[in-house]
Amino acid sequence: MSSAPEAASYRPPRFDVNVEDEEGAVVLRLNGELDLVSEPVLAGALAGVDGRPLRIDLSDLAFMDSTGLRALLTALREQTDFKLRGPLRPAVERLFELTQTNQIFSFE
């Protein structure tokens, strides 16, 4: 008997993006794990921002890999008014520290 899960029973980690309007800004609240599998969900939400001020709330983001970080860096480059919100969970905070991108992003 194998301890490996069957392919049909595999489910990727949960990831959700809640989109809200707040005082003229688009707020994306990320929840779960942002990685290669879930990044297209974030990309879809970012596509709907249409140049409005953007706030991304990372408070409920449990994990982020380099793919997620790249998506945030792309949004930073493409948006004129862009800020991140926390507090950050340890795994996410560690990624920002290791890559020194905590010095590039503006946090509210």
Image: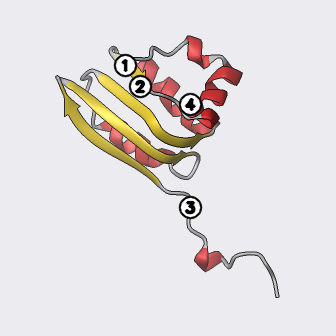
Quarter-wise, where is residue 78 in the image? top left
- Three-letter amino acid code at disc 3? Pro
**Closer to viewer: mark 4 or mark 2:** 2
Task: Please tell me which of labels 4 and 3 falls first in the chain.
Answer: 3
Describe the element under mark 3 as helix, strand or loop.
loop
Labels 2, 1: front one: 2
- Label 2 crowd (10 A; few <14 / some 14-19 / many >=20): some
The residue where tag 3 is placed is 12
The residue beneath circle 4 is 70
Instruction: Say which amino acid is labelled 4.
Output: Arg
Tell me which numbered mark, 4 or 2, is placed earlier along the sequence. Answer: 4
Query: Which tag is nearer the camera, tag 2 or tag 3?
Result: 2
Measure how far apart labels 4 and 2 are at the Cα level.
17 Å
Q: Nearer the viewer, residue 17 or 94?
A: 94
Toward the viewer: 11 or 62? Answer: 62
**Above or below: residue 14 compared with residue 83:** below
Determine the residue located farthest toward the top in the rendered image. 103
The answer to whether the residue labelled 2 contacts the one labelled 3, judged by CB atoms less than 8 Å apart, is: no
Residue 27 sits in which quadrant? Answer: top left
Q: Residue 64: percent from the left, percent from the top?
A: 58, 39
Q: Quadrant of the N terminus?
A: bottom right
Q: Residue at x 54, y 12 (%)?
A: 104
Q: Which residue is mark 2?
A: 85
The numbered disc on residue 82 is: 1
| Element at label 4 | helix
Q: What is the distance, in whole Å, between disc 1 and disc 3 at their CAs?
A: 29 Å
Residue 102 position in % (x across, y down): 57, 17
